Amino acid sequence: MPHIHRSHFTWNLLRAAAAALALGLACNAASAMTLREMRALEKSDKKQGENYINYFLVGAMEGALEAHNQAVRNGAKPSICLNGRRLEPHMARSLFDTELKRNVGVYEADMSVQLVIANALTTVYAC
């Protein structure tokens, strides 16, 4: 049986612990942003907060569309139909704000931004 140096074993243990920590952080980072967190982020940086949120909303919109398209490819019934209409990145914020205004009191602060965007797309681009 080969002799394992203690430092080699310790180094491998530390690497495994670091990998587990990184995986845990990545899983936490992948969780959905809530409406409360989004509002706090927007207020926390007076110069760039609005830009951060706008970029996030564009990503949420594109993610919702891609998730919908994947579900349709897997056999689900379409619920978002663009019907040749264009969906531009600059439209994400207005879709989001309109959905919140249309359904005042429905969305709670701990609900995800992605849910609001997905519902907005389903309402505005209904099949």
Image (tube, rainbow, N blue to C red):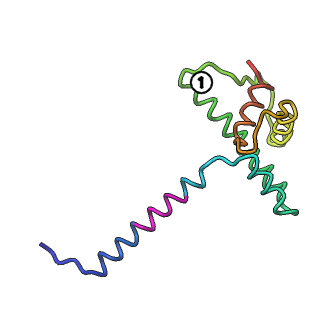
Image-based side of 77 in relation to 15, left or right:
right
Left or right of 101, for residue 114: left
Q: Position of residue 81 (x, y in %)?
A: 73, 22
Q: Measuring from the top left, give residue 45's x and y in whole percent.
A: 83, 63
Helix, strand or loop at mark 1: helix
Mark 1 closeness class: few <14, some 14–19, many ≥20 residues within 10 Å = some
Q: In this view, does 68 lie to the left or right of 10?
A: right
Q: Quadrant of residue 78?
A: top right
Displayed quadrant of residue 105: top right
Question: In the figure, 36 relative to 62: above or below?
Answer: below
Q: Mark 1 points at which residue?
A: 72
User: Viewer-proximal residue, 24 or 8?
Assistant: 24
Place of residue 19 in the rendered image (x, y in percent of width and height, measured from the top left): 44, 64
Q: In this view, does 51 lie above or below 72?
A: below
Q: Which amino acid type corresponds to the residue marked 1 in the rendered image? A: Val
Query: Which residue is pictured at 65% across the width and 46% down the height?
Result: 32
Q: Which sits in the foreground, 84 or 19?
A: 19
Residue farthest toward the left in the current orientation of the protein: 1
Figure quadrant of the C terminus:
top right
Q: Is residue 27 above or below residue 120?
A: below
Q: How many marks?
A: 1
Residue drawn at x 34%, y 71% is 12
Q: Residue at horizontal 63%, vertical 29%?
A: 69
- Dominant SS of magenta comes to helix
Looking at the image, which is closer to me, 121 or 106? 106
| The residue stretch that appears in magenta | 17-25
Q: In this view, does 21 lie to the left or right of 40?
A: left
**What's the residue at 82%, 33% (across, down)?**
99
Quadrant, the N terminus: bottom left
- The image shows residue 37, relative to residue 21, as above or below, that is above
